[in-house]
Amino acid sequence: MNAPYQQIVADIRQRIETGVLRPGDRVPSARAITREWGVAIATATKAHAALREEGLTTARPGIGTVVAGPVPPKDHDLGLSRIVASAIAIADRDGMAELSMRRVAGHLDVATMSLYRHVPSRDDLVLAMIDAALGELRIPPRYSGDWRTDLDRCARAMWEIFQRHPWLGPSMSMTRPQPAPNALRLGEWIMGSLNPLGLPLTDRLMVHVTLFSFVRGVASALEPEAQAVRDTGLTDDEWMERQSAVFARFAAQHPVPNFQEIVEPGTDFAFDLHVLFEFGLARFLDGLQTWIDR
């Protein structure tokens, strides 16, 4: 088994190799490491020393320990795409609650005010993040000719993007939709897949909105679940395993025979967001099939 400091080094090395931390980005300080990994300050200091010995990090006066490599572009090289990419990396890793203009500026090693030349406010930044994330959707270039196949493929493409960016679902509104070009592209594709059925435009729009609402609704639980893992250090399965006896006692104290059966030892019942997505998508398409056949 690796020593605690070696695991920390491995985790930070992975962030560097995957581009989450880039040359010039600040790495977690010793105090931040003690909080995130739950280790002593001596272990955090040892991890920093190991990272420097590997040539992965270097000390920059006035800034702290940063990823080694070419110095990143300064303010005059900033662009909206770099700002948005940095904001998405922060939100993916730490959640939207940790996103701020100051945090993005620190990630880019520029002055906070320099960001406002490219994005007027945090709300505008979030809109640009939504559009960029939806732009990653791998929508098929052409329709299959079967509406159910097309909707199934599109729903799975959306689910993939929401999993990649857990903050995306809670950041989007259904009643006050954000004007994101890639959201319009998605809606246009979904409605277009239904064109051969001869449905009225309003019906095609409602199918799009309902399908998107379903996928987004399930995905809205992704960020709270990720935050719970960060806070507790436990996966969902580990947490449920620790709570199984508590739920069994609770169910036994109430007249809920169905739930009592579910929590009984040996019951074959697996539940997570992926299971919910698969079940809900199939039932949605089944219901749509019945409605269309009528």
Image (cartoon, rainbow, N blue to C red):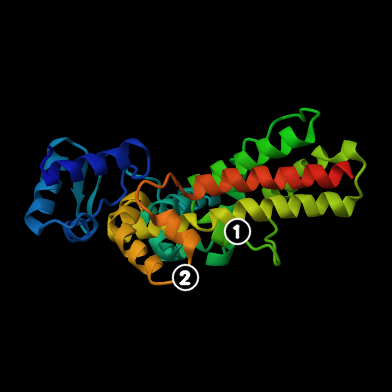
Q: Residue furthest left?
A: 42
Work out which quarter of the rendered image holds the N terminus and state it.
top left
Instruction: Describe residue 248's horizontal placement relative to residue 168 as left or right.
Output: left
Q: Which mark is residue 255?
A: 2
Which is in the foreground here, disc 2 or disc 1? 2
- Give the quarter of the image for residue 33: bottom left
Near mark 2 (Cα within 10 A), the count class, few <14, some 14-19 or many ≥20, is: few
User: Where residue 125 sits: x, y (%)?
Assistant: 55, 60
Tell me which residue sits at (61%, 54%) in the image: 216
In screen coordinates, is 85 left or right of 62?
Answer: right
* Mark 2 in CB contact with mark 1 (< 8 angstroms): no
Q: Position of residue 23 (x, y in %)?
A: 32, 42
Q: What distance separates the C-alpha of mark 2 from that of mark 1?
A: 47 Å
Q: Nearer the viewer, residue 210 or 106?
A: 210
Mark earlier in primary sequence (2, 1)? 1
The residue indicated by pointer 1 is 127
Q: Is residue 250 left or right of residue 117?
A: left
Q: Is residue 111 visible?
A: no
Counting from the top left corner in percent of width and height, residue 165 is at 50, 49
Pointer 1: residues within 10 angstroms few (<14), some, or many (20+)?
some
Amino acid type shown at disc 1:
Leu
289 or 210: nearer the viewer: 289
Q: Residue at x 28, y 55 (%)?
A: 233
- Residue at the image position 53 percent from the left and 66 percent from the top: 122
Query: In the figure, 291 relative to 225: above or below?
Result: above
Residue occupying image coordinates x 47% and y 51%? 88
Q: Give residue 178's quadrant in the image.
A: bottom right
Per the rendering, the mark at residue 105 is none
Query: Does the image show residue 88?
Result: yes
Q: Secondary structure at mark 2?
A: loop
The amino acid sitting under disc 2 is Pro
